[in-house]
Image (spheres, rainbow, N blue to C red):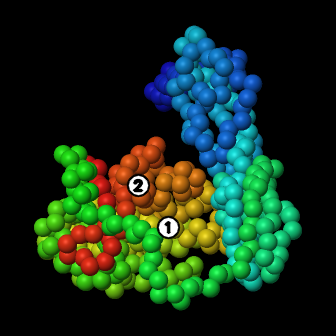
Amino acid sequence: MTKKKIIIISCISLLILIFIIGLCIYFSTRIVEDNSGFTLKENVNAEVYSKVEVSDFLETIEGKIVEEDSIDTEELGEQEISFVYLNKENKKRRGRFNINVVDQTEPLIWLGSSYSLPVGSTVDLESEILCADNYDENPTCRIKGDYDLNQEGTYKLEYEAIDSSNNKENVEFTLYVYEPKQSSSSGSSSTSSVKENTLFSDVLKEYKTEETEVGIDVSVWQEDIDFKKVKEAGASFVMIRVGYQKGIDGEYVLDSNFKTNIENALANHLDVGVYFYSYANSNKEAKEQAQWVLKQIKEYDLTLPVVFDWECYSSFNTMELSLFGLNSIAESFLSEIKEKGYDTMIYASKNYLNAIWTYQQEDVWLAHYTEKTDYEGEYKMWQLCSDGKIDGISTDVDIDILYK
């Protein structure tokens, strides 16, 4: 046999060996499709926006799950789920099944048992009352019953909201249309009691501990501030409004006292954070606002969070937003801020936190004007009053508790 034939035979033998080894590896490591090793629960529905895993839908499994993809529940409808599990013979198998993402949450109607308007009001009552859905941007919102804003009277009405999944919410309420009373020009003295202001010194005694700090939040409304006196009064931090948006789709405006406030607060060794008052109605706009805020604060040493403050609930119906969409807007703003290394927080009152900011994972600055809040969620800062009095500020001021 010639040398050339030997080389050819050797090469062919090597290729055959490599092929055989490859087949062995393939058959020993391949994941076989097999749905026989598990059973499904009767209900394989997932609520929209919920966090679910494969195991949430399995009744039984012979072995254990070793690989699974995250399940996207942001769109309604059926979707296929696949995962890899070890069967009772300790071999990898791939299972597949379908789930159905559904919306079973009723729309939100922000309305009490009564509503009052003066005779001649031009308010569009259906649009004025906040009506929102977790998923739909435009749920059907309507008032059932007759009323006349030009006629004084008491009207028994019902507000109804229906979303695209046919979830329905109804709230009965009484509409009072009244004739405005003319104010008295009498010079007689009033006998009504006047609420005393909340003294910062009292709050300091009540709430300052090893685990808390007591401070204030300010804007141009507090006028000229003597931060040396604020510091001497016992405040250890201040949250400063950096700016605000001038209405829906409006320009971003720097608080006219921002630079003076932040420079003087830092000069007096107060910890400082900032907040921006937003009307953002899209993720794109929220990111633009965050970038604007970052430009304003880049020269200053902030030790407290940058806060997203969105309170334009009376305009919500005109924005064509879902509640999840609004939460996503806040997340877009705060994510942009966090990318630059700042801590972040969202500001809202107790009732709105419970009803609207339900998809938030951010730290919370709670607004609840009471001596002891009963808000059950977690929060890092608590704004407990808006009528505070502290040396160095001539006007009322919000007082806040910061939890370490």
Q: Is residue 207 above or below residue 386?
A: above
Residue 2 image offset from top left, x and y in percent? 48, 25
Toward the front, the furthest residue is: 188
The quadrant where residue 61 appears: top right
Q: Which mark is residue 370?
A: 2
Residue 160 image offset from top left, x and y in percent? 79, 57
* For residue 269, side relative to residue 51 (left or right): left
Asked whether 269 or 290 is in front, the reply is: 269
Q: Is residue 84 above or below residue 340?
A: above
- Which amino acid lies under the numbered mark 1 shown in the image of this protein? Trp
- Which amino acid lies under the numbered mark 2 shown in the image of this protein? Thr
* Badge 2 or badge 1: first in the primary sequence: 1
Residue 126 image offset from top left, x and y in percent? 75, 69
User: How many dots with numbers?
Assistant: 2
- Residue placed at 31% from the left, 63% from the top? 198
Q: For the residue labelled by badge 2, is the local secondary structure a helix, a strand or a loop? A: loop
Q: For the residue labelled by badge 1, is the local secondary structure a helix, a strand or a loop? A: strand
The quadrant where residue 197 appears: bottom left
